[in-house]
Image: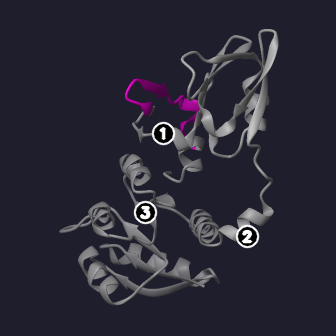
Amino acid sequence: MIKCIAIDDEPLALQQIASYIEKVDFLHLEAQMQSAIKAVEFLQENTVDAIFCDINMPDLSGMQFVRSLASPPLIVFTTAYSEYAVEGFEVNAVDYLLKPFGMQEFLRAANRLRERLEPQVAAQSATPAPCALFLKTEYRVVRVDVADIKYVQAMSEYLKVYVDGSAKPIITHMSMKLLLEQLPANFKRIHRSYIVNVDRIESLQKQRVAIDADTLLPIGDNYREEFLRSINVL
């Protein structure tokens, strides 16, 4: 059972979240409150596994509240403002529910909470990810450690694979689709010309991801929503 609390300064919105929680058999609502300050007081005496939290609240916003917690539980943000999605990514929110949302969207967030809290179940059902790939480049085949791949750029019928420890990319004849099928789940396509290793993202902007201070990659309009959902910020 996942112990959770709900925070929203709007009574009707709080009532809706509470009713959704009651309908999910693996969630248990420990408390509900209309103020993040009240939530701080509650957490001083109690522990929970997850928090459903509005962002735009008076006195102490949901984002400020989460940032103030030394060891925050899992967070699902509920808000009417989509511009907070990037900040949600920065505090590692599990999901981001944009109001008005229905039971289907809420259940998606609840299932993501369960997946985070039951990693052994996910690990047993997941297909083992490859540790290395063998890529044909020029007249030889090279071994590339998957963890060393920072990002991939498409170039006509070829791909440029950028890896740690190499000043130049590895150029191989392969399609984006085929390579993505061979990579583990932490690799996401963010543009028709780019695949990125999510573990290498330093920051996320509205239209770009930063791999480091010198490397900014564009997020394509056709990939933005799916990418943000995949990293739990939409």
Name the residue beneath numbered marker 1: 201
Q: What residue is rendered at 61% in x and 35% in y?
A: 148
Q: Nearer the viewer, mark 3 or mark 2?
A: 2
The front one of 233 and 67 is: 67
Q: In which quarter of the image is the N terminus?
A: bottom right
Q: How many angstroms separate mark 3 from mark 1 (CA)?
A: 21 Å
Using residue 129 as the reference point, say whether residue 104 is left or right of it.
left
On the image, the x and y values in percent for residue 168 come to: 58, 15
Q: What residue is rendered at 53% in x and 30% in y?
A: 221
91 falls in the magenta region:
no
On the image, the x and y values in percent for residue 199 come to: 54, 44
- Where disc 2 sits, the SS reads helix
Q: Quadrant of residue 103?
A: bottom right
Res. 189 visible in picture: no
Q: For the magenta stretch, what is the residue range?
A: 211-225
Using residue 94 as the reference point, say whether residue 212 is left or right of it.
left
Q: Which residue lies furthest to the left in this view?
A: 59
The front one of 18 and 59 is: 59
At label 1, which amino acid type do we have?
Ile
Name the residue beneath numbered marker 3: 77
218 falls in the magenta region:
yes
Name the residue beneath numbered marker 2: 121
Sequence order check, earlier mark of 3 and 1: 3
At label 3, which amino acid type do we have?
Phe
On the image, the x and y values in percent for residue 90 come to: 40, 51
- Where disc 3 sits, the SS reads strand
